[in-house]
Image: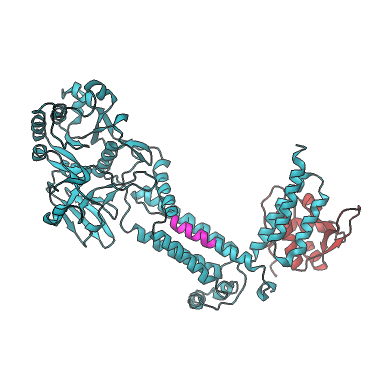
Chain colours: A red, B cyan
């Protein structure tokens, strides 16, 4: 049986947050608040998921006038598959240690 | 709080701008993404926390790509080929080398080697920042733990305020010194004087003779002072032999000596200089010279002084010789310098220049007031009766005598420095900074620096930083253990400074390179 990729708790929590509504585009700050990750941990994770084609991103126009377009994210089908593979093992990590995908 | 809010917002904006500059150019859209989130965070404090996190994120991303670029060519390829052969032999080569970096390929190795060479050169030249860290580390070793009790073989007979109040201002008549010497001798003590009696007594012509008689009746070591315009050099009371390679040039040189009066010298058991030698740049006394030599250029009559007679013992060494009834002193030398001084069958470990390092973590010797000794006499049961077999060093401790010296544990009268040094010599508790310590420290510095440079080429980022931390902790731990177990002073800080500088250089080079287009980076 092939070994599952070794993924940090923070990454699992992030994947789980995306998996709640896989089609919904999410903002960085909202994700940060939802799973308790500081921006210093969240963005390196997002960048790595993006590099591995697990995450897609785009610029979304602001709903309120006067505000700039915002970067939004959601999982790619590959990312959803990975998230499903790890579903149930993720948890909110507020107050936990920083970590990264190994 | 209200006034501070715009400032917090401005700080947050500035932080995200900095984060954008730190991120590699190819991640510009991520920098913009982080920055724009700020506009959607209404609370200023939350915005600042977010922005600071973005700075952390940028640096983490920058450093993440550090050593992940393969191919080993370039000026240090021989080194890398040798390493790869070893790694292959160990069965780990392909895996490790697959993660090798571009440092060696792009000439960074030469840069790092040059940095290491400069640091080693500065260490060899005893550049002040290196010695500052070293001195403070050694001081810390001695002040970190509470003082431990030491031997009470040595006692200081203090010319203190109470004695000055009772006997009048300094200097006292030699008749007083004669009385003091007689009292101490009667109590069974060997007497040392941390002062020089150079001029005849003018107030009482027979006082010098009385003092000479008191000296003749006991075992007394007189002090000598350095002075370039001093008297003729008296040969040491006991011969000083040099064993091993020529090393006398390592000893501190003096231009001349101020000797005690001939009538006193005639009856003394020994003579020794009481100078503290060259102080460290911060004015702290950490070590004392045991021997000194007459400079070849010192006196017109220098040529007439036999070479063996140009060596003069320090007061502590001469007192140790007299206490052990030794006929001579032997100085052991190695190619690195002086290694030890044998007196009375016991070898005292020394530094390269024959200096010894008193152990300031041991409690100071006991002090007795001169006036107390004179009043108490040598009656059985009195405090003076406890001086039997002790070495009593007479010296000034009153504030007006201006003999306070700075030490790792605070100001201390010079006579107490000599007393604690002698105590450590007799009880074997001296610290030891061997002549070869410089060589070991420089070798350690070079070895650990090369390990960092090689690791920058082959190790992953986490392993690289972990290796640096482990090496630093290990060298400091080993140094502390050597101090605790053997009183050995080996400085790990030069090695730590070098590896830290190299690690930061590697990180800076890595960050700078991420701005350049690179096939390997894209990969």
x and y percent of residue B340 in the render?
24, 53
**Quadrant hosting residue A26:** bottom right
Question: Which residue sits at x=15%, y=54%?
Answer: B300
Q: Is residue B471 above or below residue B414?
A: below
x and y percent of residue B79 in the render?
48, 75
B101 left or right, relative to A59: left
The N terminus of chain B lies in quadrant: top right
**Quadrant hosting residue B202:** top left
**Quadrant hosting residue B56:** bottom right
Question: Which residue sits at x=73%, y=54%?
Answer: B16
Residue B499 colored in magenta in the image: yes
Q: Is residue B346 above or below residue A2?
A: above
x and y percent of residue B504 in the render?
56, 60
Q: Is residue B199 above or below residue A2?
A: above
Q: Is residue B469 visible?
A: yes
The C terminus of chain B lies in quadrant: bottom right
Total label count?
Answer: 0
Residue stretch in magenta: B493-503
Q: Main secondary structure of the magenta part?
A: helix
Q: Is residue A9 visible?
A: no
Residue B418 colored in magenta in the image: no
Q: Nearer the viewer, residue B125 or B505?
A: B125
x and y percent of residue B343 in the render?
18, 49
């Amino acid at each position: 049986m092939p070994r599952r990729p070794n993924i940090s708790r923070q990454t699992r929590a992030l994947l789980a947050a995306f998996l709640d509504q896989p089609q919904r585009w999410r903002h960085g700050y909202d994700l940060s608040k939802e799973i308790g990750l500081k921006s210093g941990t969240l963005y390196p994770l997002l960048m790595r998921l993006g590099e591995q084609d697990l995450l897609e991103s785009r610029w979304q126009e602001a709903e309120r006038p006067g505000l700039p377009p915002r970067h939004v994210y959601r999982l790619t089908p590959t990312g959803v598959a990975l998230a499903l593979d790890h579903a149930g093992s993720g948890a909110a990590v507020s107050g936990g240690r920083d970590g990264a995908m190994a | 709080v209200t006034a501070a809010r715009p400032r917090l917002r401005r700080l947050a904006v500035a932080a995200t701008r900095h984060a954008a500059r730190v991120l590699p150019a190819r991640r510009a859209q991520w920098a913009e993404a982080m920055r724009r989130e700020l506009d959607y965070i209404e609370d200023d404090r939350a915005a600042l926390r977010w922005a600071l996190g973005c700075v952390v994120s940028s640096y983490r991303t920058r450093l993440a790509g550090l050593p992940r670029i393969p191919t080993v060519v370039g000026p240090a390829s021989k080194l890398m080929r040798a390493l790869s052969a070893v790694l292959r032999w160990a069965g780990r080569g392909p895996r490790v080398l697959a993660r090798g970096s571009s440092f060696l390929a792009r000439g960074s190795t030469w840069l790092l080697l040059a940095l290491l060479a400069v640091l080693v050169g500065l260490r060899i030249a005893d550049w002040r920042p290196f010695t500052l860290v070293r001195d403070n580390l050694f001081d810390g070793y001695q002040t970190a733990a509470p003082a431990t009790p030491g031997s009470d073989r040595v006692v200081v007979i203090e010319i203190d305020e109470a004695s000055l109040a009772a006997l009048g201002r300094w200097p006292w008549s030699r008749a007083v010194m004669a009385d003091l010497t007689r009292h101490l001798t009667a109590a069974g003590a060997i007497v040392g004087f941390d002062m020089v009696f150079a001029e005849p007594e003018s107030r009482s012509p027979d006082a010098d003779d009385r003092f000479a008689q008191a000296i003749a009746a006991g075992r007394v070591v007189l002090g000598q002072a350095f002075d370039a315009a001093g008297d003729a050099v008296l040969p040491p009371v006991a011969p000083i032999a040099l064993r091993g390679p020529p090393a006398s040039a390592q000893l501190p040189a003096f231009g001349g000596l101020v000797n005690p009066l001939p009538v006193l010298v005639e009856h003394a058991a020994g003579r020794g200089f009481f100078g503290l030698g060259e102080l460290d740049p911060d004015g702290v006394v950490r070590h004392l010279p045991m021997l000194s030599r007459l400079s070849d250029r010192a006196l017109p009559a220098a040529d007439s002084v036999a070479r063996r007679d140009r060596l003069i013992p320090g007061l502590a060494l001469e007192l140790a010789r007299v206490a052990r009834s030794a006929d001579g002193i032997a100085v052991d030398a190695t190619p690195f310098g002086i290694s030890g001084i044998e007196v009375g069958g016991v070898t005292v470990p020394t530094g390269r220049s024959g200096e010894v390092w008193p152990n300031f973590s041991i409690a100071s010797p006991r002090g007795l007031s001169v006036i107390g000794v004179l009043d108490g006499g040598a009656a059985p049961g009195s405090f003076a009766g406890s001086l039997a077999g002790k070495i009593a060093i007479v010296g000034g401790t009153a504030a007006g005598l201006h003999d306070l010296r700075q030490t790792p544990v605070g100001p201390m009268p010079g006579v107490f420095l000599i007393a604690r040094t002698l105590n450590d010599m007799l009880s074997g508790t001296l610290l030891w900074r061997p002549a070869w310590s410089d060589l070991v420290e420089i070798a350690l510095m070079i070895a650990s620096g090369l390990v960092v440079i090689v690791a920058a080429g082959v190790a992953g980022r986490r392993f690289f930083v972990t290796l640096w931390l482990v090496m630093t902790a290990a060298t400091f731990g080993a140094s502390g253990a050597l101090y605790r177990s053997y009183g050995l002073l080996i400085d790990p800080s030069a090695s730590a400074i070098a590896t830290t500088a190299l690690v930061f250089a590697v990180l800076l080079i890595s960050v700078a390179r991420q701005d350049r287009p690179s096939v390997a980076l894209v990969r």
